[in-house]
Image (cartoon, rainbow, N blue to C red):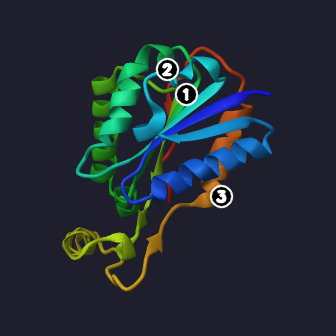
Amino acid sequence: MPRVLIVYGTTDGHTQKIAEAVADTFASEHWEATAVNARHAGRDLGPERYDRVIIAGSLHGQRYQHALRRWVRHHAAALNRAHTAFLSVCLAVLEHRPEVEQELRNIMERFFDETGWRPSVSKVVAGALPYSRYGWLKKWIMKRIVAKSGGDTDSSRDYDYTDWEDLRQFTRRFARAREQSPVRETEPALA
């Protein structure tokens, strides 16, 4: 049975949900799937024993989680020899403006340059606004940021913007793809 490793970084828990959905989709394709938070991955959990590796990180303040960056940097050489995907989870993708999409590409490029890893494929995935998990200060800051882009500011409820079906389709394509020397491509941003 082929094996996939999903290493993720999460701040408010939504990227963990995404990683678990990816693992479930791989399992439905008859893969053995392991999803691990980068904070708990450790240096000895490497990509060498897996047929595919997916890295998922959420974007906060134009950076991905420190533990995720550290794990990817440590395993960059092995990741570059593997068939890999990167899922960038963020809310900015909802703005649908060329300058925002370019900034997201720039942020991902900085992450790749900083870690020394170049994934076979990358995809931007819309995240969530879990207002119920935020303290008053973060809630106030997030409402101000979201209001500027015309987003949901009713902090009495949470918002999930992830296109789960699109994520499942991406995951199935990645699971079924013939392994080849790393092909570098970027999936279009979610609509």
Q: Pointers 1 and 2 in contact (CB under 8 A)?
A: yes
User: Can you give x and y, in whole percent of width and height, for residue 58 in the image?
Assistant: 38, 49
User: Can you give x and y, in whole percent of width and height, for residue 32 in the image?
Assistant: 73, 35
Image: 142 above or below 89? below
For the residues carrying marks 3 and 2, which lies nearer the camera in this image? 2
Q: Earlier in the sequence, mark 3 or mark 2?
A: 2
Give the residue at mark 3.
165
Q: Residue at x 34, y 33 (%)?
A: 69
Helix or strand or loop: what does disc 2 sit on? Answer: helix
Mark 2, other Cα within 10 Å: few <14 / some 14–19 / many ≥20:
many
Res. 145 image quadrant:
bottom left
Res. 137 image quadrant:
bottom left
User: Can you give x and y, in whole percent of width and height, for residue 56 in the image?
Assistant: 47, 42
Q: Amino acid at mark 3?
A: Glu
Q: Earlier in the sequence, mark 1 or mark 2?
A: 2
C-alpha gap between disc 1 and disc 3: 20 Å
**36 to the left or right of 140:** right
Helix or strand or loop: what does disc 3 sit on? Answer: helix
Image: 42 above or below 57? above
Give the residue at mark 1.
84
Q: Residue at x 38, y 20 (%)?
A: 74
Give the residue at mark 2.
79
Q: Earlier in the sequence, mark 1 or mark 3?
A: 1
Q: Residue at x 40, y 40 (%)?
A: 39
Q: Amino acid at mark 1?
A: Thr
For the residues carrying marks 1 and 3, which lies nearer the camera in this image? 1
C-alpha gap between disc 1 and disc 2: 7 Å
Identify the image quadrant of the N terminus.
Answer: top right
Depth check: give the residue in front, 107 or 142.
142
Residue 142 is tagged as none
C-alpha gap between disc 3 and disc 2: 27 Å
Mark 1, other Cα within 10 Å: few <14 / some 14–19 / many ≥20:
many
